[in-house]
Amino acid sequence: MHTSVFDMWIRHYDGSEIYREVKYEAELNKNDPWNDRTLRQIEAQRAYCIENNFTYEVVTEKSTDMKCHRTRT
């Protein structure tokens, strides 16, 4: 059993929900043994979401929806 805390839980106005984990792109490299803990965390979170029918996503600094969106005031 693993214990993990999601970085974000998002509930949209339409009621849909997303559980989100934020990582640097480099942390997702499966060939780097330093990333084993991160990859186990992601797999545990993904399994939890599948079991509970939740939407899950991993985003990185390269993900378009993680860019800073600012509006003028």
Image: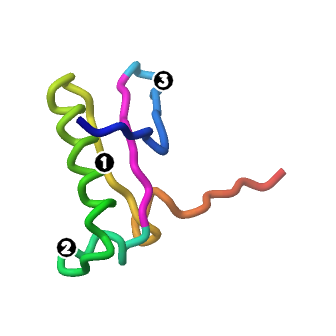
The amino acid type found where label 1 is placed reads Glu
Q: Secondary structure at mark 3?
A: loop
- Cβ atoms under marks 3 and 2 closer than 8 Å: no
Relative height, residue 59 to residue 46 (above, below): below
Alpha carbon distance from label 3 to label 2: 36 Å
Q: Which residue is mark 1?
A: 57
Q: Which residue is mark 3?
A: 13
- Crowdedness near tag 3: few (<14), some (14–19) or many (≥20) residues, C-alpha within 10 Å: few
Q: Which residue is mark 2?
A: 30
* Relative image position of residue 17 (x, y in whole percent): 37, 28
Res 69 quadrant in image: bottom right
Q: Decide which of tag 1 and tag 3 comes sooner along the chain.
A: 3
Q: Decide which of tag 3 and tag 2 comes sooner along the chain.
A: 3
Disc 3 or disc 2, which is closer to the eye? 2
* Relative image position of residue 72 (x, y in whole percent): 78, 55
Q: Secondary structure at mark 1?
A: strand
Residues rendered magenta in the picture: 16-23
* Relative image position of residue 13 (x, y in whole percent): 48, 23
Q: Residue furthest right?
A: 73
Q: Secondary structure at mark 2?
A: loop
How many labels sit on residues?
3
- Residue 18 within the magenta-colored segment of the rendering: yes
